[in-house]
Amino acid sequence: MEKKARQFGYTITRDRQIDYDANKHDISKIVAAAEPSLNLCISCGTCSATCSAALFTDFSLRHVILLLRRGETSGLAKEVAKCMLCGKCQLVCPRNVSTRNLIIQISKAVIPAQL
């Protein structure tokens, strides 16, 4: 007779650690060279709070910049494509980051890397 393990409602969650060494940081360097104001971003979230695209989608420029800095470039082109380039984020940025040019440079750097 085979014993079955009891289920208590708990499961083992997958590991959520970020391996920075395994990620691709070359795209972040390319974008920072093309748009140096990326280095001024402090991820305050003001851009995400005023985003027109965020009203209709789950787009967040803050999240895009975070993924870029982490080197997690898979799915980045899909996220950047959600931006409507309206420029509201650039108007409210307290650090004067050129967010519109940043989105353009990210899409230029990411799309050829995925081909």
Image: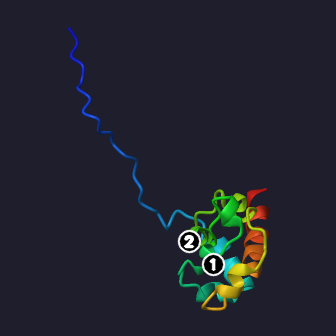
Q: Nearer the viewer, residue 61 or 108?
A: 61
- Picture quadrant where residue 98 is located: bottom right
**Residue shown at the point (24%, 24%) measured from the top left:** 5
Amino acid, disc 2: Leu
User: From what the image shows, is residue 38 above or below residue 79?
Assistant: below
**Residue shown at the point (24%, 19%) measured from the top left:** 4
Q: Quadrant of the N terminus?
A: top left
The picture places residue 65, in percent across and down from the top left corner, at: 61, 73
The picture places residue 43, in percent across and down from the top left corner, at: 54, 79
Q: Residue reaching furthest top? A: 1
The picture places residue 34, in percent across and down from the top left corner, at: 75, 83
- Residue assigned mark 2: 66
Type of colouring = rainbow
Secondary element at tag 1:
helix
Q: Residues within 10 Å of mark 2 (few under 14, many from 20)?
A: few
**Residue shown at the point (62%, 67%) measured from the top left:** 60
- Picture quadrant where residue 84 is located: bottom right
Earlier-in-chain disc, 1 versus 2: 1
> Which disc is residue 88 wearing?
none
Secondary element at tag 2:
helix
Q: Quadrant of the C terminus?
A: bottom right
User: From what the image shows, is residue 88 above or below residue 66?
Assistant: below
Amino acid, disc 1: Cys
Q: Nearer the viewer, residue 2 or 41?
A: 41
| Alpha carbon separation for disc pair 1 and 2 | 13 Å
> Which disc is residue 47 wearing?
1
User: From what the image shows, is residue 9 above or below residue 1?
Assistant: below
The picture places residue 69, in percent across and down from the top left corner, at: 57, 74
User: From what the image shows, is residue 40 above or below residue 25?
Assistant: below
